[in-house]
Image (spheres, rainbow, N blue to C red):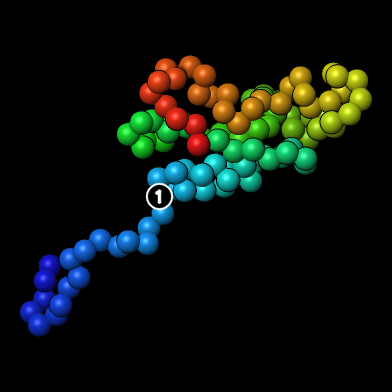
Amino acid sequence: MRQKGKNMDSKKRKDYISWDEYFMAIAKLSAMRSKDPSTQVGACIVSNDNRILSIGYNGAPNGFNDEKFPWGREGENLDTKYPYVCHAAVSYTHLTLPTIRLV
């Protein structure tokens, strides 16, 4: 609403972040949820019309107790994190790939 005697700027801000910067910031924030002591990865799955479809981070699969989880990187395979850790972007695999972009 314009007030009498006040000069209101009618142009939009020019110093806002791009869509990719916005989605990357969300991915970086999501990575902070990872309990992996050596690798923190976040993902933000976005449609072609800039709608967030999914957000995720690497970590133990649902139902695993991450307090008892083998977070090690070396040793016998089953005693390390590698056969168990879910990648940050695993939740997007059911989506049709041409309709999304991974930031």
Instruction: Check disc 1 and report the residue beneath it.
Output: 18
Residue 23 visible to the viewer: yes
Residue at x-position 36% and y-position 31%: 48
Of all residues, the one furthest to the bottom in this rendering is: 5
Image quadrant in which you'd find residue 99 = top left
Residue ID at (79%, 27%): 81
| Left/right of residue 77 with respect to residue 52 in the rendered view | right
Amino acid bearing label 1: Ser
> Where 26 falls versus 83 (above or below)?
below
Residue drawn at x 44%, y 44% is: 20
Tell me the quarter of the picture where residue 38 sits. top right
Please, what secondary structure does the residue beneath circle 1 have? loop
The front one of 5 and 60 is 5
**Residue 69 vs residue 12, the one in the foreground:** 12
Left or right side of 93 for 76 = right
Q: Mark 1: few, some, or many residues within 10 Å (few <14, many ≥20)?
A: few
Q: Residue furthest right?
A: 75
x and y percentages locating residue 77 in the rendered image = 86, 19
**Residue 33 relative to residue 13: left or right:** right
Q: Position of residue 11 (x, y in %)?
A: 21, 64
Visible in this render: residue 68? no
Residue 100 on image: x %, y %: 42, 27
| Quarter occupied by the N terminus | bottom left
Question: 76 or 69, which is in the foreground?
Answer: 76
Left or right: residue 86 versus residue 52 is right
In the rendered view, would you say 92 is above or below 51?
above
Residue 45 in the image: above or below residue 95 = below
- x, y percent for residue 82: 77, 24
Q: Residue at x 91, y 20 (%)?
A: 76
Which image quadrant is residue 90 in?
top right
